[in-house]
Amino acid sequence: MCGIVGYVGRRDAAPLIVEGLKKLEYRGYDSFGVATIEKGLAFDKHKGRISENDQSALSLKGKIGIGHTRWATHGVPNDANAHPHFDCTGTIALVHNGIIENYAELKRELNSRGHTFRSETDTEVIVHLIEEEYAKKKDLFLAVQNVVPKLEGSYALLVISNNEERMIVARNASPLVIGIGDGETFAASDMTPILEHTERAMFLEDGDIASISGNEVAIYNHGSRVTRPLELIDWSLEDVKKGGFAHFMLKEIYEQPQAFYNTLRAVNSETFPDFVHNPASVTVVACGSSYHTGLIFKYLLEESCRIPVRLEFASEFKYYPPPVEGLVIGITQSGETADTLIALKQAKSHNCRTLAITNILGSSVSRVADATIFMRAGPEISVAATKSFIAQLAVLMQMVNNISGRKCGDMLIHAHQAIEEILLIDLTNAVSVCTGAKDIFYVGRGPFYPVALEGALKMKEISYIHAEGYAAGELKHGPFALLSPETPVIALCLPGDTYGVMISNIKEMKARGAPVIAIGCDGDSELPDIVDIFIPIPRTSPFVLVLTSLVVLQLLAYYTAVALGRDVDKPRNLAKSVTVE
């Protein structure tokens, strides 16, 4: 959930770390901090965003440094709780992404041995434990190696000492990538802060501890020297820039036609492992937007192939595991979603075959699952998922196409053109209704029910308007009590078996005084006459209508949030990658 950057090399570390942390603000922006080695440890850390308060950090000197941008878990956002954290002697500094589950017990033990704590964080126990081990042999690598077995939970650690010309890094259940440059080495939560400097990367695995000094990276796992493959990352620097758009979210919405097309072309019958071609049953585990893609997949696969699909929240799977068999699919944009990783591990323990769908090469989920399908969405910077959502659907729709005997291949290969056409839609009237609302209902039926869920999620997470998605028929079972002239309803009323009953549902909502914004197809002769605002989209296949209606709802949320002056790319209290339970 937090972002970390480290540097060892020939240039001043602080400016490189600061710029890297700015690229990681989507991982956390409650507070930030930087520490470098220059005749001792120098540091600067503050509450707030590094993009708004970076001048003092930029002035730090030294060729070795570490930095952190925080999403608070233990302790409120303030200067004291900001990373880096330091030992009692002020000679060791550490930044951490993850959660130490046994920190309270460790802290009691450290307090009893005379250590002084300056923060409320779980992280600070780690640096005090390293302090004790370092005092024994004055070797930072050995100190970290001796401490990590005592930690329960997840961590990506960057550690420096003013007594040593190197950086020690370690990972367990939290992402960490090493970028290899020309006479310099980077360590970070992901590739976005590294791309400007190198395309060569190594992805550390759970249990890895590495010593980084000069041009050497020495990696160990459980005491044995190991090698990790050097990979070339095909993302470009331009991929992580706004490119003239006002926000990353709008840029990424406009990148969806290409993301869908690239992913669709990269995934085919040969890409899927044998156990995916004709499963007897499927269980999908996911969180957030990925859960909604799984629900769309359930409707499409069951309708097209008559294969039963059950959907489970990954966050519930660990504590209330259902009986599972057959194929289990884990969907996670980052590949680091803690709940999804745990759910896949549990599925494997029940002898299920597991498939992961993710956007990030080298992510943890690719090492947990039996097989992995990589999307081709490219980096997604905005916290709200847009093009990664569309790319997930490209994989899942191609899977339905593959299992059904390629019944829908022709419609999918042209879907990106329909998405592109939708990008120019005029939503001015709908935005004006939404900006004045405190509550909004989204309704749909069949595969458009999860589209409604995703539309509501987008609206609430970036505009802060309370929004809920419902299967349209469920409004009568309670939520009708909330309908009023001040409660807009956004209805997905597309051609198909449910069109007639959706018309009836909309009339029932109108009878309660609720203003209705409806998304329907061009040429609809009935819907425009019964709703307040009609948003027409091109008439096409059901699969493609799912995609185009999703994009309409993304744009509606975006323009509403902009009209309200929200921080679209960094909505309050949220982070892009949820690496803790």
Image: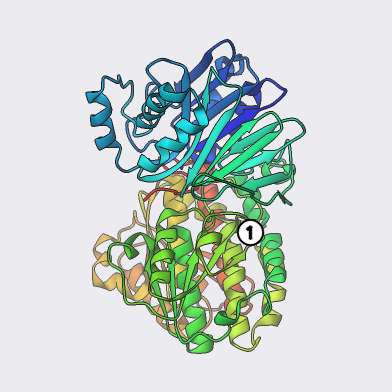
Q: List x then y, in percent, for residue 559.
A: 55, 48
- Kind of residue at disc 1: Ile
Q: List x then y, in percent, for residue 341.
A: 44, 59
Q: List x then y, in percent, for residue 264.
A: 68, 70
The colour scheme used here is rainbow
Write down the residue under mark 1. 425
Would you say residue 442 is visible in this rendering? Answer: no
* Numbered-mark total: 1
Above or below, 134 against 390 in this view is above
Above or below, 195 against 324 in this view is above
Taking the spot 47% from the left edge, 17% from the top edge, the residue there is 91
Comparing 266 with 291, the one in front is: 266
Comparing 395 with 327, the one in front is: 327
Q: List x then y, in percent, for residue 396.
A: 57, 73
Would you say residue 306 is visible in this rendering? Answer: yes
Taking the spot 63% from the left edge, 89% from the top edge, the residue there is 405
Where residue 508 sits, quadrant-wise, is bottom left
Local packing at callout 1 (Cα closer than 10 Å; few below 14, some 14-19, many 20+) is some
Tag 1 secondary structure: loop
Residue that extends furthest to the right in the rendered view of this protein: 182
Taking the spot 51% from the left edge, 82% from the top edge, the residue there is 301
- Residue 32 lies left or right of residue 548; in this view the side is left
Taking the spot 54% from the left edge, 24% from the top edge, the residue there is 52
Comparing 506 with 218, the one in front is: 218
- Residue 63 lies left or right of residue 370; in this view the side is right
